[in-house]
Amino acid sequence: MNTFNGSCHCGAVKITLHSSKAADELGARSCQCTFCKAHGASWTSDPNGRLEITIPREKLSRYTFGTGTAEFLVCATCGVVPAVIWQDGEKLLAVARVNCLAQSELLLAHTKPIDFDGETTSSRLERRARGWTPASLQVIG
């Protein structure tokens, strides 16, 4: 199992992605939506992996837009979004922001642009259920 550690800019929000895939297999997805383009965000996930997210309660800010089905976890201090979560029934699924991972250069070397414009909400949720990483969110304090 490979471990990819990271955090927001100030280090308050921590993420750890566990994956059987190497960095070149995981790669990065460069979303072309207005939010991701404005933030220069690229994402990765492994449906067979695990993403651990730890956030101090006083640093947690959540942002939703568009379909309102996913929550962008924003550090209230530095404004960085290290992960996006979605609740699929009883399962929490997420994507990790590649730019926040210590091994970002290895992942970003295998970036693919993606565009989800025109995707229906049901198609979007099905895609997430298939491709996002099972996650745990620990809010401390």
Image (cartoon, rainbow, N blue to C red):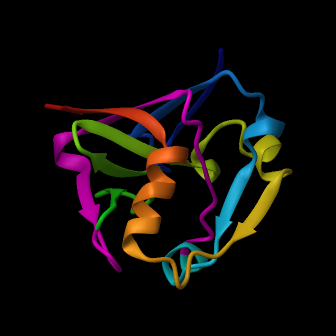
Q: Quadrant of the C terminus?
A: top left
Q: Which residues are magenta?
A: 39-68
Q: Is residue 131 left or right of residue 99?
A: left
* Above or below: residue 43 compared with residue 115: above
Task: Return the x and y of residue 112 as percentages of the image width and height.
Answer: 78, 62
Q: How many marks?
A: 0
Q: Nearer the viewer, residue 86 or 79?
A: 86
State which quarter of the image contains the N terminus: top right
Residue shown at 50% from the left, 50% from the top: 9
Residue 3: x and y in percent read: 62, 22
Q: Is residue 54 above or below residue 63?
A: above
User: Which residue is outermost to the left?
Assistant: 141
Residue 16 is situated, as x and y percent measured from the top left of the image, at 50, 29
Q: Is residue 118 left or right of residue 3?
A: left
Which residue is pictured at 54% across the width and 35% down the height?
47
**At 32% across and 76% down in the image, what residue appears?**
67
> Does residue 116 sit above or below 95 in this rendering?
below
Quarter assignment of residue 104 = top right
Q: Is residue 43 magenta?
A: yes
- 128 inside magenta stretch: no
Front residue (pair 49, 107):
49
Which percent across, then down, holds residue 74?
A: 35, 58
Residue located 75% across and 46% down the image? 27
